Every structure is written in structure tokens, then in C-alpha cells.
Amino acid sequence: MRQILLTIDRLIESISNIPKVYKMSDETETLEVSPSNGKPVKPLDDHTSAKSDDGEDAFSNSKPKNEEHASVVAAHYNHLEEKGLKERFNSPIFYLRNFNNWVKSVLIQDYTDKIREKDYGKPLRVLDICCGKGGDLSKWQKARVERVVFADIAQVSVQQCETRYEDLRRRCGHLFSAEFIAADCTKDTLRDKYADPSINFDIVSCQFGLHYSFESLSQARRMLTNISECLKPDGYFFGTIPDAYEIVSRAQKSENFSFGNRIYNIKLLFDPKDGYPLFGAKYDFHLEGVVDCPEFLFNFDLFVKLAAQYGLELVYKARFSDFYKDHSEKYKQLLNRIICFESYPAPPGKELIGEASEYEHAQIIWDQMEKKNERDCLGTMSMCEWEVATVYMAFAFKKQKHIWDSKGKPSYITSADKNQTTRDSSS
Ligand SMILES: C[S@@+](CC[C@H](N)C(=O)[O-])C[C@H]1O[C@@H](n2cnc3c(N)ncnc32)[C@H](O)[C@@H]1O
């Protein structure tokens, strides 16, 4: 079967036209963010919670119940069954999973390459935070890194990650060294748990997990400390998260702030009429066979401001549809190798993964094609799977160099500072 054309551009057009009706905070420039109830809030400082002028916790709906939430999340991921190869092939989200893996592979490849451009042959050390069962083990192997620290709140997942690592090592003989940590990365200090607390990472990767830290400001800060504390200057922090703007845009067009299709469902667990809390804005997320637990809207603009306080400067951000546009040419072979797209029409003796109506975009192109031969087909994704893929976005931050200020605190040198210095010295 010969795939002659990818129809993803048409899917991108149809889904990414959803207007962005929602802006979570216009004032993140100063970090004097107004919560939805309109009460004034003090600028966020180094403390772990922000109080409004009348003394109330500004993010009151994010107050602890969070012990409870952490155990719900851990229990959910701990009980997720490991799927065999056959089950994975028959999964209703087969292509979506592969596409997500493509995005993660590209991020890992791109940023390890960037570091090696500067220092070829350098042994790379990685923190894979919210690692789950180790879905990225073979990606780290392909990236030829030297050491990976895997951390996740779900103890059973961490054990499964270790077992998978040992299996992989037995099969391939030589593999990076690794350590495995079960910890709540939004509450615990990871550095205290490393075999070598003086370790420095070249890369920190957080795939599909960062939004769990947006339960409260203190948890977002702890997560950022864990991410940034041991990351070297010029090292990268990258990952993938659900795009809160996209979720809210879709919710506003839905009934009861609940939307989805045959493979996923999202329901906001707060009334958006009262506004959107910056932290603790909970929603239920169900994705067929993979996720079924509450999560938190991730305010990206706010995160960028917070991250700057930890020396992390945003260098890339794209919704998955744009990520695909940015990288599909360079990583075309990988798209094919990990089978990100379904053949349309279905090959003889096979069925499409979705209903016929989910392939209208492909059918239009197929009908317009002249001179088709028997072996021809299109490469596409069902509308239902693409709708889920476009909930997500990818991002990357670079760790800034720092100098020590008079109080012994790090003062980070941003690219704006560097440009200023260059301008000053050239004038
Ligand atoms: C969707 S899974 C992604 C797993 C893995 N990164 C991947 O891409 O396959 C999200 C992971 O985040 C982990 N997680 C959620 N809250 C966490 C927390 N507070 N600390 C550490 N890990 C957490 C979950 O246990 C789960 O393994």
C-alpha cells in the first residue's frame, strides 16, 4: 500500500479555526493577577501563597483537599493496566498515541541535538519528571543520553518503569544508567532524593504531567524548583500539556461545559460564569483507556512569568497542529516509521478505526484525486483522534546563566539583558 498524501492540513484547517474566545489573565505582565472574584491580589512573591488584601487566600478554591487529589491521581495511574502489543494495535486511539509519541520523540531529538551542537560527545544527564511507566525509555536510548532520573507520584508506575528499563537493558546490552524515584513532585524536594544531590541535568522533560502542579501556587512553585534547581545554564526544559485556552474555548461552546467524542470527554468542574481561578481550576478528563481523572487548567502565561523567577526563559511554544507544521518536513520518516497516520480508504480486509463520517476531510481529497491506482491511499487521522491531539501543546524553556546578587540570591541574565549588553558595547 502506498500512502501518497497526508490530509492533516485539512484537519488542521477545520479544527484550529476554533476562535480563541478566552484569555485567562491579561495582567500577568506584572503578576498582579486578578482572580475571578474580582478581589485585588498582591503580586506573587517568593512565598508559597498569595493573600488578598482582606487576608483571604486569593486562590481560595485551591486550598488543600490536595492530599486527596494527589492520591486520586496516583491511584488512577497505578491501576492503569500495561497494554500488550496486540491490545495497543487494536486501540481506538492507536494513531493518536503514535502521534503523541512522535511529538515527544521530536522534542527529545531536537533539544539533545541543540545541546550537542555546542559540545559534541558531551554525556547528557536527564530528569524525566512525571515519567509514568517509562513511555520515553526507548526515546532516551535513541538519543544516546548517559543518565536518566525518572520521577513520578505513582509508585506502581515507577516500579513498572524500572522493570521496563531492566528488560531493555537485558535486550540491548548497553543502556544509559538510571534511577527511579516515587515522589509527589509538586510537594517533595527531589534533590534530597537523588543518589547524587550534586547532579546537574542538561535536560528536564515533563510529558503530559505539568498541569497537575496547577492545583495551587505553592505546588506550581515546588514543581518549578524541582525542574530548575539542578538544570545547568543553557540546558533545556521541555514538555507537553493540555492547552487551557483550547479547553475553555471548546467548553464555552458546549452544553454544561462538557464536550468530547467517542474517545474523550472533558467536563469543567467549576462554573466559568464565576470566572476562572488561576490555580485549582479542576476538570474531569476521560481519554479512552489512558486517562480518567481530574486535572487542572494550566495557565501558560502565568507559568511563563513564574518560570522566569526560576531562570527559565520560554524559547518555543506551539499547539500540536502548529508543532506538526513546524516539524513534519524534517521528521517525515519518523512519522511513517511509528505509524502516525491511518491509510484511507481502509486497505482490503481491514476496517477504519472510526466511523465513515470521521473521514470526510480525506474523502473530499480522495474524490478530487485523478489517476488513482489500486495501491494508492491517503495517510490521515480520524476526526475524533485529531480533536484530542489538538487539545495539547508543546513548549521549551532554556535555563539562563546567573550572577549572585548582594543577598546571595541568583540573578538571572535573560536574552533581553544580553541583547542590551550587546547594543551597549557596540554603540
Ligand atoms: C499522562 S501521564 C504521562 C506519563 C509519561 N510522562 C508519558 O508521557 O507517558 C501523567 C503522569 O503524571 C504523573 N503525576 C501526576 N501528578 C504528579 C505529581 N504531583 N508528581 C509526580 N508525578 C505526577 C502521573 O502519575 C502520571 O504518570
Image (cartoon, rainbow, N blue to C red):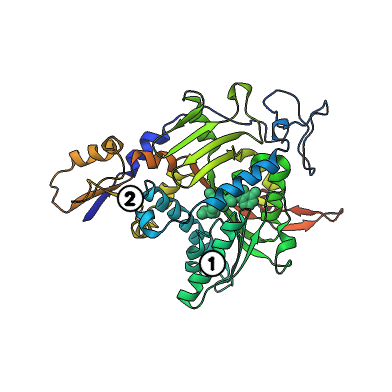
On the image, numbered disc 1 is attached to which residue? 163
Cβ(mark 1) to ligand 1 < 8 Å? no
Q: Eyeballing the image, is 101 above or below 19?
A: below
Residue 142 percent across, percent down from the top left: 47, 67
Q: Residue furthest top?
A: 273
Return the disc, 1 or 2, that comes first in the chain's sequence: 1
Q: In front here: 185 or 373?
A: 185
Q: In front here: 367 or 134?
A: 134
On the image, numbered disc 2 is attached to which residue? 341
Whether residue 396 appears in this view of the structure is: no
Cβ(mark 2) to ligand 1 < 8 Å? no
Element on which disc 2 rests = loop
Residue 174 percent across, percent down from the top left: 51, 77
Instruction: Judge the density around disc 1: few (<14), some (14-19), many (≥20) Cα neighbours within 10 Å.
Output: some
Q: Which residue is at a point 39% across and 57% down the rendered structure image? A: 330
Horizontally, residue 342 falls left or right of residue 97, namely left
Whether residue 255 appears in this view of the structure is: yes
Q: Eyeballing the image, is 114 above or below 95?
A: below
Horizontally, residue 190 falls left or right of residue 131, namely right
Pair 1/2: label in front: 1
Instruction: Judge the density around disc 2: few (<14), some (14-19), many (≥20) Cα neighbours within 10 Å.
Output: many
Marks 1 and 2: CB-CB under 8 Å? Answer: no
Element on which disc 1 rests = helix
Q: Eyeballing the image, is 388 above or below 157?
A: above
Give, as a three-letter code, the residue at label 1: Thr
Horizontally, residue 57 falls left or right of residue 307, namely right
